[in-house]
Image: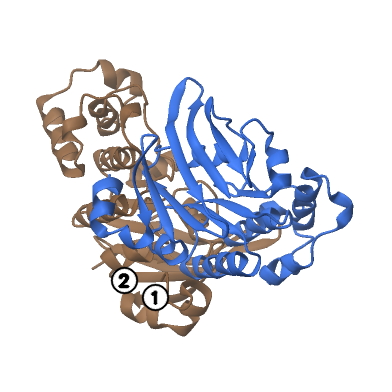
């Protein structure tokens, strides 16, 4: 399978510190890849580089065959890369359904999309997505009445509606109860059946539930990569990330 | 040692805690669980005095502390490690720790030496700005900051949130050592069940500001978890 994302020799220096150091990293199309690493290893920086929030000091990022290095974030979004934030972004007073509608029509202006007639095709797609994330029975409720976990799922629905080719998920289960985490992991697994997903996650229960191939970053470099079982058996990974295994 | 009797706390006009009562024994280890928004953090903030209850009573070591200011509670021996650590980013590690001593009017005493026995990693970082520390280091600093006040009880708000497994393991060991070596009671708010089961003896589950389940940690069965902690 072809690489949808190809990062070559990526280096990022911020006020004298090297955050990413000549990193080579690739994700195949329709893969679910889990990115692990100690706090400060460069995971979030890598994601910010891929979405165009920061520009690398050197190196190249190719997406779907195109060089996107240094491209503006909105252009990268239009190419099909969507990122989920730790704190969900949504229109608080709008109903769940309308929030998804706005994302479905992300190429139009928010205001215009609200006053445009919803085609039967749009509506069917929105219901399909809401069923998929388990929020169909909350469709008419304003977003600010959702629980913490439901808000995360609404953001997943909004991401799916924007029809991305690559989904970047940075610690999407933070702050959830364990039950919420498991349900979210199950949702991510289903999303990954027809999307490429790059997931940053610390909770090893979740990682063990869904991970196949895993990449471990350490001090801005690739420390280990491969099937989960091999990576968690790696002694350096145990030393810098997992510990003795009580919580890993 | 710490007893909370029927407190009602508000956040603005929202009634968050509805007549909450709990007892923490001398040297006890107690966990409070619940979904987001259940009132867990508000409970800790009520105990430390950052969100004073409108009614009900909080007693510590026999004294009524319901109306005391938070620094007065700290002086009596209640340590607090807030959610998100709340390290002061532009102050050094040392200054962050010294600030905790100033807060209880003991700035001339100097830092108690034992602090670095629990956090040897911080010893080499004393001149580093708090803001550049990693999440794990910040969490250690937040606990160390509470510890310099030599508390009799430590209130911990989600200390493992966002931390890698090996750092969770370190924090787990440190809290157990603080409990046994310094005879410090622990009141923990946490989502990580494995951590809760490993560290505490008793639990209570909050649901929209009411205690809906409580008991010894052995009674925190998967069934209880499913019933009260699902999404």
Q: Colour of chain B?
A: blue
Answer whether labels 2 and 1 touch (C-beta < 8 Å). yes
> Marks 2 and 1, how far apart in space?
7 Å
Q: Quadrant of residue A31?
A: bottom left
In depth, the one of A60 and B54 nearer the eye is B54
- Give the mark, 2 or 1, whose residue is nearer the N terminus: 2
Q: Position of residue A217 (x, y in %)?
A: 48, 69
Residue A111 seen anywhere in this rendered image of the structure: yes
- Residue at point 74% right, 45% down? B75
Element type at mark 1: strand
- Residue at point 52% right, 79% down? A239
A235 up-or-down from A57: above or below: below
Q: Position of residue B231 (x, y in %)?
A: 27, 44
Name the quarter where the N terminus of chain A is drawn.
bottom left
Q: Check disc 2 and report the residue beneath it.
A: A213
Element type at mark 2: strand
Q: Quadrant of residue A67?
A: bottom left
Name the quarter where the C terminus of chain A is drawn.
bottom left
> Which residue, as the protein is rendered here, is positioned at the far right?
B108
Q: Are marks 2 and 1 in one subunit?
A: yes
Q: Position of residue B79 (x, y in %)?
A: 65, 50
Q: Check disc 1 and report the residue beneath it.
A: A225
Q: Chain of mark 2?
A: A
Sort mark 2 into few (<14), some (14-19) or many (20+) by Cα contacts within 10 Å.
some
């Amino acid at each position: 399978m072809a690489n949808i994302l190809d990062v070559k020799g990526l280096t990022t220096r911020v006020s004298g510190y090297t955050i990413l150091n000549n990193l080579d990293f690739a994700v195949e199309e329709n893969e679910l890849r889990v990115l692990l690493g100690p706090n400060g290893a460069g995971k979030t920086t890598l994601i910010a580089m891929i979405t165009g929030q920061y520009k690398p000091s050197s190196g190249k990022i190719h997406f779907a065959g195109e060089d996107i290095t240094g491209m503006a974030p909105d252009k990268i979004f239009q190419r099909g890369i969507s990122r989920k934030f730790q704190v969900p972004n949504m229109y608080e007073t709008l109903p769940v359904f309308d929030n998804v509608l706005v994302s479905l029509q992300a190429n139009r202006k928010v205001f215009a999309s609200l006053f445009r007639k919803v085609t039967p095709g749009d509506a069917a797609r929105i219901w399909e997505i809401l069923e998929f994330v388990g929020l169909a029975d909350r469709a008419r409720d304003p977003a600010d009445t959702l629980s913490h976990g439901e808000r995360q799922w609404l953001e997943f629905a909004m991401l799916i509606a924007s029809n991305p080719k690559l989904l970047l998920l940075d610690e999407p289960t933070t702050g959830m109860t364990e039950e919420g985490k498991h349900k979210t992991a199950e949702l991510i697994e289903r999303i990954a059946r027809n999307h490429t997903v790059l997931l940053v996650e610390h909770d090893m229960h979740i990682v063990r539930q869904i991970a196949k191939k895993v990449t471990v970053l350490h001090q801005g470099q690739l420390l280990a990569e491969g099937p989960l079982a091999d990576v968690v058996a790696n002694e350096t990974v145990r030393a810098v990330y997992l510990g003795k295994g009580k919580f890993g | 040692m710490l007893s909370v009797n029927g407190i009602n706390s508000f956040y603005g006009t929202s009634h968050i805690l509805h007549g909450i009562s709990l007892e923490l024994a001398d040297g006890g280890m107690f966990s409070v669980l619940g979904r987001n928004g259940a009132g867990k953090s508000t409970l800790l903030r009520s105990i430390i005095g950052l969100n004073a209850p409108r009614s009900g009573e909080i007693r510590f070591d026999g004294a009524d502390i319901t109306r005391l200011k938070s620094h007065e509670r700290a002086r009596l021996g209640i340590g607090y490690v807030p959610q998100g650590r709340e390290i002061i980013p532009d102050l050094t590690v040392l200054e962050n720790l010294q600030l905790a001593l100033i807060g209880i009017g003991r700035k001339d005493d100097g830092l108690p030496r034992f602090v670095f026995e629990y956090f040897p990693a911080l010893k080499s970082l004393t001149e580093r700005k708090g803001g550049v520390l990693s999440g794990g280091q910040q969490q250690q600093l937040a606990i160390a900051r509470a510890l310099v006040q030599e508390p009799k009880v430590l209130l911990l708000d989600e200390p493992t949130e966002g931390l890698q497994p090996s750092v969770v393991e370190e924090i787990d060991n440190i809290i157990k050592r603080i409990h046994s070596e310094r005879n410090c009671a622990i009141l923990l708010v946490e989502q990580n069940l494995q951590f809760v089961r490993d560290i505490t003896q008793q639990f209570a589950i909050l649901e929209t500001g009411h205690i809906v389940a409580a008991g010894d940690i052995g009674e925190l069965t998967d069934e209880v978890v499913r019933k009260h902690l699902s999404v």
